[in-house]
Amino acid sequence: MDTSQRTPPWRRPATKVFVVLPAYNEQENLGTLLERIDRSMFENRLDYEVIVVDDGSGDETLAVARRYAEDMPVRIERHEVNQGLGATIRDGLKAAAEACGDEDIVVAMDADNTHTPGLIRSMVELVREGNDVVIASRYQRGALVCGVPFHRRVLSSGAGLLFRVVFPIRGVRDYTCGFRAYRGTVLKRAFQVYGDGFVSESGFQCMVDILLKLRRMNCIFREVPMILRYDLKGGASKMKVGRTIVRTLALMLRRRFGG
Ligand SMILES: Nc1nc2c(ncn2[C@@H]2O[C@H](COP(=O)(O)OP(=O)(O)O)[C@@H](O)[C@H]2O)c(=O)[nH]1
Ligand SMILES: [Mg+2]
C-alpha cells in the first residue's frame, strides 16, 4: 500500500452533526432518545455531538443528561429557571452555531422521543446536496403519524394550510414541526443578521418564527416525510393548545401587516 499519500486538506473536515435537544421535564424520554441517537449516528458513521438544553426542569432531566454525557458526546446547557421553548431552542441553536464549522450541520428535534433519529441521515444528505433547511414533515407522501390526538392534528394541519397561503415558502408544508436540519453557515448568518431576535417568540410558535426569519434570507427549503411516533411519548404534551393558537395567529398577523 502506498503510504506516502497524505489525506488532502479539503477532505479532512468531515461533516459533524450537532443535535440540539430542548428539554423540559423529559426524564422519562431523554435517556432512550440519547441511546437511539448514539446508535443511529454510529450505524450511519456520522460524527456528532448532542447539545441538551435543560430548561429549568423540576425532574431528573439534568441528571439523566449528565449520566449519558459520561458515555457519549453530550454537552449540557442550562437555564436555572424555566424560560419556554423559544428561548431554549434559541440557546441550543446558538451554541451549535458557535461551535460548528463551515461544513457542519445542526439538527433540532423534540426531546420527547417522538422523532426518529434514523431520519437524520437522509436530512444530512439533503443538506449536503445543497438544501439549507430540511424539515421532517408530516405532510409529504410517505409520512405517518401515530398516536396524535385528533384536535392536535386539526391544529397543525390548520396552521400548515394557513401559512402556506399567507407565507408560502417553496418546498415547505410543515411549518410547526420541531424536527429540522439546518446548514451550519445558515444559522451563523441568521444570528449575525438578527442577533437573539432570530428567535423572538417564546412559546411553541417559535418554530414558525424561525422559518419566517429564514424565508427572508432566501434559503433553500426541502422536506422529507417523517414517521411521528407520538405513541412512544412518555408523559403528557407540554403544549398549551389555546395559548399556542392565539399566539401563532398573532404572529401571523404581525408579520403580515407589519409591526
Ligand atoms: N425549554 C422548554 N422546552 C419545552 C417546554 N415545553 C416543552 N418543551 C420541549 O419542547 C419539545 C416539544 O414539547 P412536546 O411536549 O414534545 O410537545 P408536543 O410533542 O408538540 O406535544 C420537547 O422537547 C419539550 O421538552 C418549555 O416550557 N420549555
Ligand atoms: Mg413532541
Image (tube, rainbow, N blue to C red):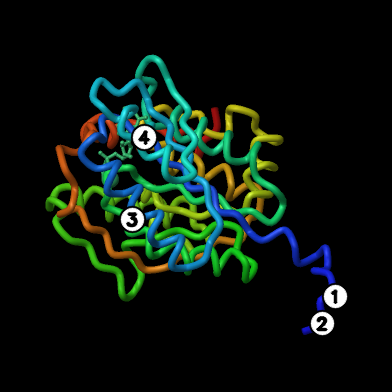
Front label number (2 vs 3) = 2
Please give the name of the residue rendered at 57% of the width and 42% of the height, measured from the top-left corner: 213
Q: Amino acid at mark 3?
A: Arg
The residue carrying mark 2 is: 2
In the picture, the disc for residue 5 is 1
The Cα atoms of the two marked residues, 1 and 2, are separated by 7 Å
**Element under disc 1:** loop
Amino acid under disc 1: Gln
Q: Residue at x 28, y 64 (%)?
A: 227
Q: In the rendered structure, are the residues bearing label 3 and label 4 in contact, judged by CB atoms less than 8 Å apart?
A: no
**Snapshot quadrant of residue 208:** top left
Q: Earlier in the sequence, mark 1 or mark 3?
A: 1
Q: Secondary structure at mark 4?
A: helix
Quadrant of ligand 2: it is: top left
Distance between mark 1 and mark 4 Cα atoms: 42 Å
Name the kind of residue labelled 2 in the image.
Asp
**Which element is circle 3 on?**
helix
Q: Are marks 2 and 3 in contact (CB under 8 Å)?
A: no
**Within the image, what quadrant is residue 29 found in?**
top left
Label 1 and label 3: CA atoms lie apart by 37 Å
Residue indicated by mark 4: 65
Ligand 1 lies under 8 Å from the Cβ of mark 2: no
Q: Residues within 10 Å of mark 1 (few under 14, many from 20)?
A: few
Image point 31% across, 34% down: which residue?
A: 64
